[in-house]
Image (cartoon, rainbow, N blue to C red):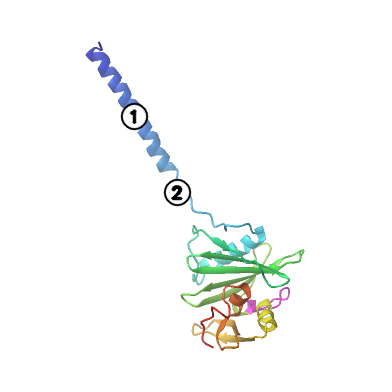
Amino acid sequence: MMRGSQYLRISILNLAVLLFAAAMVACGGATEPLAPVPATPAGDAPAGVLRARDSVLDYLRNGVNECVPPQQASWTSDDVPNPPDGYDVYRFNSGGCAISITTASEPAAEPIYHVSLGDGATGFCWQAVVDDHGQILLTGSAAQTDPTLGNPARNYCEQQGFTFEMVTLSSGQLCGRCTFDDGQSCNAWAYFHGACTPESADIAP
């Protein structure tokens, strides 16, 4: 039969063990902050593409701050199974903001990336041209065309038999528009990337 003093010693020992374990858990929670969700797409994308995307996001966070999810936001990638000939296209989405990145399929010593952002809810439209080091070379309407890629969105629209035009939105932004035979239209880059089609277009000419 266990004596009272032995029972008391065992109870105190058990209590000490429990308190020590609880302290370890508490300390662990205090010293290990929640890690942000990495802004990595669901699929594989070249490092240069991700550098271009993140460089543009940082640029916008420090400026207009439109169509820019928080830095810890996660991104998903949409498949672009049949990009226009001669180009690779990568499309990412987060919180209603869509980013599409276009680069030439042929390997280049100094790859160039065209980054297009759009937010269907706000009508935000913006472009940038970025080099392989993440350096932003052109922004806004100046980025509609660049010496390396030209204007693939315009070329693609016209090759499909539709009409391309530059329009000034109510926000003052200058964007390319591809107008279809029925008078409906898409943002030219959204059409190029496959995010908007003649069947889904709902933008009035």
Q: From the viewer's perspective, is residue 184 above or below residue 61?
A: below
- The amino acid pointed to by label 1 is Leu
Residue occupying the point 44% across, 47% down: 33
Residue 28 is at least partly visible in this image: yes
Identify whether 19 is placed above or below 41: above
Q: Which residue is at a point 64% across and 78% down the rendered structure image?
A: 144
Residue in front for this viewpoint, 51 or 198: 198
- The span picked out in magenta is 142-150
What is the crowding at mark 1: few (fewer than 14 residues within 10 Å), some, or many (at least 20)?
few
Instruction: Specify the quadrant of the image occupied by residue 24.
Output: top left
Q: Is residue 62 visible?
A: no
- State the separation of the CA atoms marked 2 and 1: 25 Å
> How many numbered marks appear?
2
Q: Position of residue 100 (x, y in %)?
A: 60, 69
**Which is more toward the observer, 139 or 97?**
97
Is 155 covered by the magenta stretch? no
Counting from the top left corner in percent of width and height, residue 169 is at: 52, 84
Q: Which residue is mark 1?
A: 18
Q: Residue at x 51, y 68 (%)?
A: 97
Which residue is situated farthest in the top direction here?
1
Taking the spot 27% from the left edge, 14% from the top edge, the residue there is 6
Q: Residue furthest left?
A: 4
Q: Position of residue 17 (x, y in %)?
A: 35, 26
SS for dot 2: loop
Q: Is the stretch drawn in magenta largely helix, strand or loop?
A: loop
Q: Amino acid at mark 2?
A: Leu
> Which residue was labeled with disc 2?
34
Q: For the C terminus, give its image quadrant.
A: bottom right
Q: Quadrant of the N terminus?
A: top left
